Image: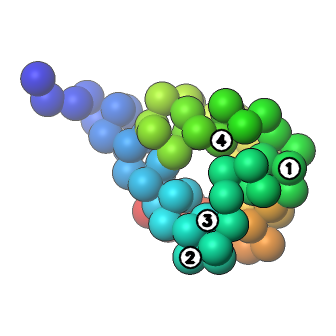
Amino acid sequence: MSMTPKEKALAQFGSHLRSLREGQGISIHELSARAGLEYSQVQKTEKGRVNLTLTTILALADGLNITPDVLLKY
């Protein structure tokens, strides 16, 4: 079964988020603490299971100490 365009975008964003986090050598727990988010929310985002809000994107970018545009270039 193929993914819808929305599902594909969420999966690609999640993969990009994981790559950025791992590139900084931090765990999901650390990123969630830095971003002020629940561990499960970050985990589900990396798996492409969450459609994010703008405030969550901003929090993740802040937690990674990057600008939101870097996070959105997936």
The residue singled out by tag 3 in the image is 21
Check disc 2 and report the residue beneath it: 23
Q: Position of residue 64 (x, y in %)?
A: 74, 67
Name which quarter of the figure residue 15 lies in. bottom left
| In contact (CB < 8 Å): disc 2 and disc 1 | no
Residue 51 picture location, percent across and down: 56, 30
Q: Is residue 47 above or below residue 15?
A: above
Task: Tell me which residue sits at (48%, 29%) in the image.
Answer: 49
Mark sitting earlier along the chain (2/4): 2
Q: CA distance from mark 2 to mark 1?
A: 17 Å
Residue 52: x and y, percent?
63, 35
What SS does tag 4 mark?
A: helix
Outermost residue, left side:
1
- Determine whether the residue tagged by mark 1 lies in a helix, strand or loop: helix
Alpha carbon of mark 3 to alpha carbon of mark 1: how far? Answer: 13 Å
| Amino acid type, label 3 | Arg
Q: Count neighbours of disc 3 (C-alpha within 10 A) and say few if under 14, some if 14 to 19, many if 20 or more.
A: some
Q: Are marks 4 and 3 in contact (CB under 8 Å)?
A: no
N-terminal-most mark, 2 or 1: 2
**Is there CB contact under 8 Å for labels 3 and 2?**
yes
Element marked by disc 3: helix
Q: Earlier in the sequence, mark 4 or mark 3?
A: 3
CA separation in Å, label 4 and label 1: 10 Å
Q: Nearer the viewer, residue 3 or 27?
A: 27
Picture residue at 37% right of the left edge, 33% below the top:
6
- Residue 66 drawn above or below residue 16: below
Mark 4 closeness class: few <14, some 14–19, many ≥20 residues within 10 Å: many
Visible in this render: residue 65? yes
